[in-house]
């Protein structure tokens, strides 16, 4: 039965016209993978690595991996680099993109960011190596590859207790089939991700909801309930709309490293043949701003209570310190 399911995946992935966009259970950590506006919010320098093996044991089942490096220039601007790999059946897509986010600050604690990503996708179909029931099937006679331009857009609102974001991960819908290629808004996939924080330093409850939808495509949703103890260790449970349960944990090993694991178990009619899904996350930040109670004070307010977005004041202070370091007595005003 598992082999039959694998063959069906190969056929469906080969003749599908729309692009697949990745979906992870621990996306609350790596939101920048699908939203260029949600980068460098939990640290000035960050790296997110996430790997997902879906339906373990099924030949041709989806496998996804993503890397997202992020750097915050100042309160108003951040940049990132994202790379991803997504395979289903005989089709695989490798993507590279640069990201830029511009932020508007409110009350030194809340920000609204707009993000844009630009890059390329490399799509490969290994049709020639496919085992088919009909010998010398012309539809599977030749493998091919294609490189094409793509982009993404997103918005993200962040505050000490609440966050919400929306994005379009792929603005251009070019596929190997060349059916309606390019800029096709009716075929966009829309992502909405939101969550909030309740509790204190000893215990924090963080419900997170991720929605994915589009025209003429099934609506998909994830609910993740994250329970964090002393800002270090979290136990996560949740539900995926495809009738599967989510369970996992994450640990902040040091102020600069976090590891996480998520497990999906299908409870639907295909649970005996689909297998379970496993997901591993590794995050690095220098350092993490994990204390949400001190979010505003630690990230957006300077020692005198003013906003860190006053770049002129910071420039004068930097030059003044530099002058004292090299023995100059005069001050930069």
Image (cartoon, grey):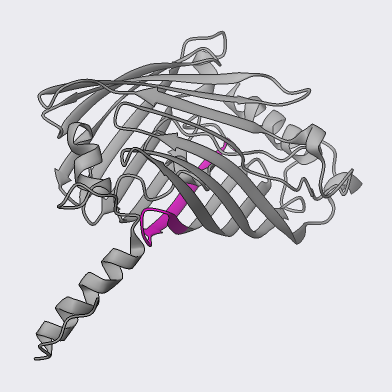
Q: Is residue 157 above or below residue 223?
A: below
Q: Is residue 31 above or below residue 78?
A: above
Residue 266: image x %, image y %? 47, 16
Residue 121: image x %, image y %? 67, 57
- In which quadrant of the rendered view does residue 188 lie? top right
Q: Nearer the viewer, residue 315 or 175?
A: 315
Is 280 displayed left or right of 10 in the figure? left
Residues drawn in magenta: 60-79
How many numbered marks appear?
0
- What is the magenta segment's predominant secondary structure? strand
Q: Nearer the viewer, residue 74 or 332?
A: 332
Residue 39: image x %, image y %? 43, 48
Please name the residue shown 10% across and 88% down the image: 329
Please name the residue shown 35% across and 33% down the image: 159
Please name the residue shown 20% across and 42% down the image: 297
Is residue 65 shown in magenta? yes
Q: Is residue 282 above or below residue 60?
A: below
> For the C terminus, which image quadrant?
bottom left
Q: Nearer the viewer, residue 318 or 227?
A: 318
Is 289 displayed left or right of 159 in the figure? left
Please name the residue shown 49% across and 28% down the image: 193
> For the N terminus, which image quadrant?
top right
- Residue 290 visible in the snapshot: no
Residue 303: image x %, image y %? 15, 52
């Amino acid at each position: 039965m598992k082999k039959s399911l694998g063959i069906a995946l190969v056929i469906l992935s080969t003749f599908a016209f729309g692009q697949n966009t990745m979906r992870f259970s621990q996306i609350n950590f790596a939101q920048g993978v699908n939203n260029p506006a949600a980068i460098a919010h939990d640290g000035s320098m960050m790296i997110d690595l996430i790997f997902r093996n879906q339906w373990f044991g099924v030949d041709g089942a989806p496998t996804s991996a993503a890397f997202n490096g992020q750097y915050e220039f100042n309160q108003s601007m951040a940049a990132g680099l994202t790379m991803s790999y997504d395979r289903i059946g005989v089709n695989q897509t490798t993507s590279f993109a640069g990201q830029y986010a511009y932020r508007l600050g409110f009350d030194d604690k809340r920000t609204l960011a707009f993000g844009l990503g630009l890059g390329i996708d490399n799509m490969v179909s290994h049709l020639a190596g496919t085992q088919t029931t009909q010998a010398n099937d012309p539809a599977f006679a030749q493998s091919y590859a294609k490189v094409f331009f793509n982009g993404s857009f997103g918005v993200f609102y962040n505050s000490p207790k609440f966050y919400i974001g929306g994005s379009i991960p792929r603005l251009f819908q070019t596929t190997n089939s060349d059916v309606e290629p390019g800029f096709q808004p009716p075929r966009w996939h829309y992502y909405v991700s939101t969550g909030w924080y309740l509790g204190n330093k000893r215990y924090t409850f963080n419900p997170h909801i991720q929605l994915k939808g589009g025209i003429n495509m099934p609506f998909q949703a994830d609910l993740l309930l994250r329970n964090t103890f002393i800002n270090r260790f979290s136990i996560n449970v949740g539900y995926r709309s495809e009738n599967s349960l989510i369970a996992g944990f994450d640990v902040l090993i040091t102020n600069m490293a976090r590891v996480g694991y998520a497990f999906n178990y299908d409870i639907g009619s295909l649970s005996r043949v689909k297998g379970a899904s496993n997901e591993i996350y590794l995050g690095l930040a220098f350092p993490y701003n994990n204390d949400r109670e001190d979010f505003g004070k630690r990230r957006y307010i300077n020692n005198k209570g003013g906003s860190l977005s006053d770049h002129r004041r910071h420039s004068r202070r930097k030059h003044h310190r530099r002058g004292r370091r090299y023995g100059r007595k005069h001050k930069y005003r």
